[in-house]
Image (spheres, grey):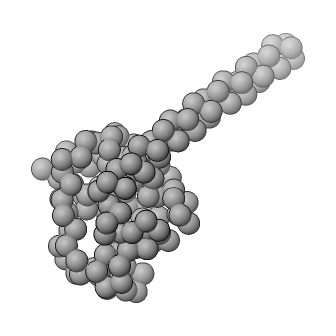
Amino acid sequence: MQRIYLTFVVLFLFIAGVSAQTNNKLVAASFARGKTVYLQRCMVCHQADGGGVPKLNAPLDASTAVNGSDVAKLIKYIVKGFADRVEIDGELYSNVMPAAADLKDEQIADVLTFIRSHWSNKAGPVTKLQVKQTRSKLK
């Protein structure tokens, strides 16, 4: 009986390890694709260092909005754009963020995964499913 239990535990740990490696590879691929989207579509306003432009374009690095749990809000900003004056971490920003509704769900998930885990940010990845579900509620 103990031998069966030990075999089960070893098998479980092996499967868990393979699963974690697979997940890490998927997140790394999403990060790389997201970096490309960021460089093409976001960097002009939010800068290479994610620092934004004071009083115009909000910073993405170390931002509570980026690192927070409300991923749906970030998805909405990308899909619908944003034209309101907003306070983020005690600073006011007033430049218009154009909508990027042309981006596919995977591209939005990838760029948010990149932003939320780059620079000093330590937030989790965003999935294509999260984007799809949020986008369906925006219509």
Relative to residue 5, is residue 41 depicted above or below?
below
* Picture quadrant of residue 6: top right
**Would residue 75 appear left or right of 29 to someone viewing this image?**
left
**Would residue 74 appear left or right of 15 to someone viewing this image?**
left
At 25% from the left and 42% from the top, the residue drawn is 104
At 31% from the left and 75% from the top, the residue drawn is 57
Q: Please tell me which residue lies in front, 51 or 91.
A: 51
Residue 85 image position (x, y, % from top left): 22, 81
* Picture quadrant of residue 9: top right
Relative to residue 45, is residue 27 depicted above or below?
above
At 55% from the left and 60% from the top, the residue drawn is 122
Relative to residue 120, is residue 128 depicted above or below?
above
At 24% from the left and 46% from the top, the residue drawn is 103
Q: Can see residue 133?
A: no
Q: Can see residue 67?
A: yes
Residue 82 image position (x, y, % from top left): 20, 68
Give the total number of marks visible in the rendering: 0
Q: Which quadrant of the figure contains the N terminus?
A: top right
* Residue furthest out toward the left: 139
Q: Please tell me which residue lies in front, 26 or 65.
A: 26
